[in-house]
Amino acid sequence: MKSRWFVKSILVAMLISFSGFAKGVKVVSKTTDAKGNPKETSTIKFDNDNLSMESKGKDGHMIVLFRSSENKMVLANISEGTIMEITEKDLEKMGATMEQAQNQMKDMMNSPEIAEAMRQAQEKMKDLPKEQQEMMKKMMPNMGGGGMNMNAMDEPNVTYEKSGSETVNSWKTTKYI
């Protein structure tokens, strides 16, 4: 969960760094669970070439600051009392490391050893009771080439509904829930 928030933060910061429209804009997002209980409140503020984001919820309290003039991002995990600075070079290194790890994972999952282990598991499945066989068959599509299919862990379906509109500092806004 924290890593998804981190990735989203980086993407938003990069998008904003290329745009000049977002001066003096504040976006507040409140996330709820399926029953409507509050889960997280996120606030994003754009000012000149800077961006600040704050997220408070059950996963903790995080603040992200992006300064385009310095081309760096500062992440403060208030809950854990930690601060981390990320530069453009750091992002390039992280991207290369992630790509290398993904390639290693693909190679490992497509290995003959994994294929043989899957074949043996399917053979043993025949000895299971019918209910357990059905349960295993449902799980099998999530196992690509013997390993975990990363696409099987998609984000939940999110919907937004318009709940009103107002004018803020001469900007027409629309509120969504």
Image: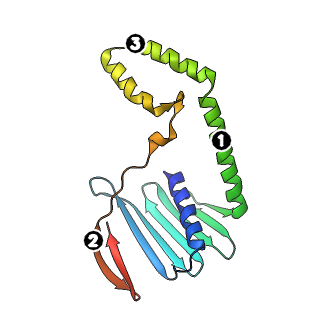
Look at discs 3 and 2 and give the one toward the viewer: 3
Q: Secondary structure at mark 1?
A: helix
Q: Secondary structure at mark 2?
A: strand
**Label 2, label 1: how far apart the Cα atoms are:** 43 Å
Q: Are marks 2 and 1 in contact (CB under 8 Å)?
A: no
Q: Nearer the viewer, residue 70 or 11?
A: 11
**Label 3, label 2: how far apart the Cα atoms are:** 53 Å
Image point (36%, 52%), residue name: 157
Q: Which residue is mark 2?
A: 163
Question: Farthest residue in the bottom direction?
Answer: 170
Image point (62%, 66%), residue name: 74
Q: Residues within 10 Å of mark 1 (few under 14, many from 20)?
A: few
Q: Which residue is mark 3?
A: 126
Q: Earlier in the sequence, mark 1 or mark 3?
A: 1
Image point (64%, 32%), residue name: 107
- The three-letter amino acid code for the residue at tag 3 is Lys
Q: Is residue 115 above or below residue 67?
A: above
Q: Secondary structure at mark 3?
A: loop
Image point (45%, 13%), residue name: 124
- Dot label at residue 171: none
Task: Indicate the position of residue 26 as horizontal and vertical percent values.
Answer: 45, 77
- Dot label at residue 101: 1
Is residue 79 something that shows in the picture?
no
Q: Quadrant of residue 40?
A: bottom left
Q: Residues within 10 Å of mark 2 (few under 14, many from 20)?
A: few
- The three-letter amino acid code for the residue at tag 2 is Ser
